[in-house]
Amino acid sequence: MLKYIAKRIGLAVVTVWAVATLTFFLMNMVPGGPFLSEKAISPQATAALEAKYGLDKPLFQQYLTYIGGAVQGDFGDSLKQRGRTVTEIILMKFPVSARVGGISVLVALTLGIPLGCIAALKRGKFLDSLISVVATCGIAVPSFVICTVLLYTFGAKLKLLPTVGLTSWKNYIMPVMALSFYPTAYIMRLMRSSMLDVLGQDYMRTAKAKGVSGFVSLFKHALRNAILPVVTYVGPMLAYTVTGSFVVEKIFTIPGLGGEFIGAINGRDYTLIMGTTIFLATLIIVMNVVVDIVYKIVDPRIKLK
Amino acid sequence: MSEYLVDIKNERLSFFTPAGEVKALNDVSIHLKEGEVLGIVGESGSGKSVTAYSLMGLTAYPGKLIGGSLYFNGHQVDQMTDKEMRKIRGNEISIIFQDPMTSLNPVYTIGNQIMEAILLHTDKSKEQARERAKELLELVGINEPDKRLKQYPHELSGGMRQRVMIAIALACEPKLLIADEPTTALDVTIQAQILELMMDLKKKLGMAIIMITHDLGVVASMCDRIAVMYAGKVIEYGTADDIFYNPKHQYTKGLIRSIPRIDAKEHERLIPIEGTPVDMLNPPKGCPFAPRCEECMKICLREMPPVTDLGDVHYTQCWLIQKEEMEKGAAK
Ligand SMILES: Nc1ncnc2c1ncn2[C@@H]1O[C@H](COP(=O)(O)OP(=O)(O)OP(=O)(O)O)[C@@H](O)[C@H]1O
Ligand code: SF4
Ligand SMILES: [Mg+2]
């Protein structure tokens, strides 16, 4: 187990480094720069600013300087938000995103798993068909369309829910719905098919032949086997939630890291782009390791290598 | 109360599938006394498993009992609720399945799965149940029971897993053990070991056994009675001697001809039964074996043969035998 974790940490460092390097050079290939759009600034001032942040140096030297700093935990100052370090910004904005994203993930799991099970148990009945239709919609419709429809109906027409900011619990409803719709639908489908598969397995018949009640055989014998594909999906789901949050936070004007990231890209805030990218990459990798360990706990057949 | 431990009378069972009614069992009668071994033989699809499962209330959807009655140990099984059935399953009747590789739950330990049956049907504490599980593993010839209890199914070989299945089945000392082709999925050497173990356990514990197989040779030495099934019917029933030394039905004779013999000479070939099994969706009006029978007569195609009694237990369903017996009767 320890060996496995050490190995995964090593791999994670390499992955994050690769992501950072790729982002660094791609980002610099995109035309424009952090200080170009600010019309009021004279060319001399721009040059002075660029010199201050080292942007006048050759690209490769900039890269080495950045990586050197990052290794020591110094992600630099934001180029656009004067006086704030990238670390400060991430620490301030991430909790907001984490709350919206975390709630969405929980909603997806707590709705998707039972609904998928119910669909499987009621296979071919009305409830199953209904759940299947909803699931298909959830998978087919992109999240920005869902956002727009939600905003239009609940926000603009019915005026039931606030559309901007995150001041009360009501503000969470629409973003969470937008963010959790796809994963919920996906988990429902996954759970349904894996539950159907498990219910037909020989060991379910063994359980029944032992005299186990339907309830126990469902919760003890079936669920733990049927949930395995869902556990594997949790990794990709987290990645989806992170990327989905970029769009959703922008649309609902949520002051989170996703919106900040989009802003940083538009404003060519190089240090903030890098910092956020490294942070999110690390987050996703760490969560995937956690998921792998959980998988190992649920399924004893899995060997962590 | 019936003198039999198992008494299945005129059982009819159908699967109502989208394609139509599959008449899996047509008038099956089987009985078995305490401590006896009954072999059910027949080719794939003849209804062996369906008969056994229905006795445990394990008939798979969309199967439905549509006639007859099933008695076990004085209970009328077909009239019992699922809750009542659960008290019997795994307690008074146990079953081992064909494929030990898939019959154990992969995510629970061997110990957990053996103890589950014990805890369900007895008042034993967890500790006592663990002790009992250890005892059972020793009983079925598994060494290092302490270690095995903590292992998962995938860590055990096929033969070992079947031994574990037997341990689970025996957990509550059932009166009847059903073995549904318990060795088909195993290597030949392991097969022999498992059968030997079962006979050994039967001697020790004295339970009755229903041994389901498509290989008559396997059960020859161990069965008191044998039921030969064909197309959802028991076409011949008798003691092992009746079936082996005095087979009457053409299908039984064919089965016996197809058993590999240890004393067979090199050039003697096995004689398989020609033809294909019946289509159970559209069973023929007359004798189901008629299309494959060398002795087939006109009446065989028109009408189902009646039951012909040949002795205390021996009976068959065949026009040819019916005719012979009637001629014998007339001659007297
Ligand atoms: N769940 C089911 N749905 C529809 N038909 C079924 C079902 N289970 C069994 N049958 C039918 O019942 C008949 C008897 O099946 P059964 O499983 O008892 O055969 P068997 O004698 O045990 O054969 P095998 O040696 O292959 O195990 C078959 O014709 C099969 O098509
Ligand atoms: S009833 Fe006729 S067809 Fe059927 S086994 Fe007997 S002789 Fe053959
Ligand atoms: Mg079978």
Image: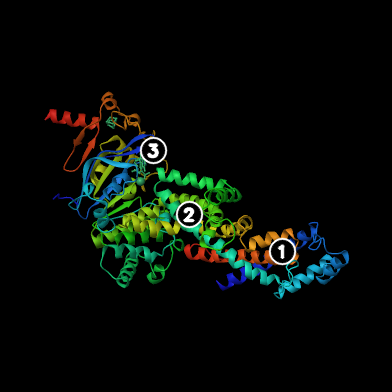
Q: Residues within 10 Å of mark 2 (few under 14, many from 20)?
A: many
Left or right, residue B298 beside residue A4: left
Residue A233: image x %, image y %? 54, 57
Quarter the C terminus of chain A occupies:
bottom right
Residue with the most extreme bottom position: A72
- Residue A269 pos. (x, y %): 74, 64
| Residue B272 marker | 3
**Which mark is nearer the camera, 2 or 3?**
2
Q: Is residue B170 visible?
A: yes
Chain at numbered mark 1: A
| N-terminal-most mark, 1 or 2 | 2
For mark 2, name the chain.
Answer: A
Q: Chain of mark 3?
A: B
Amino acid identity at mark 3: Pro
Q: Position of residue B145 (x, y in %)?
A: 38, 69
| Side (left or right) of B41 relative to B108 | left
Residue at the farthest right position: A44
Q: Which residue was labeled with disc 2?
A: A112
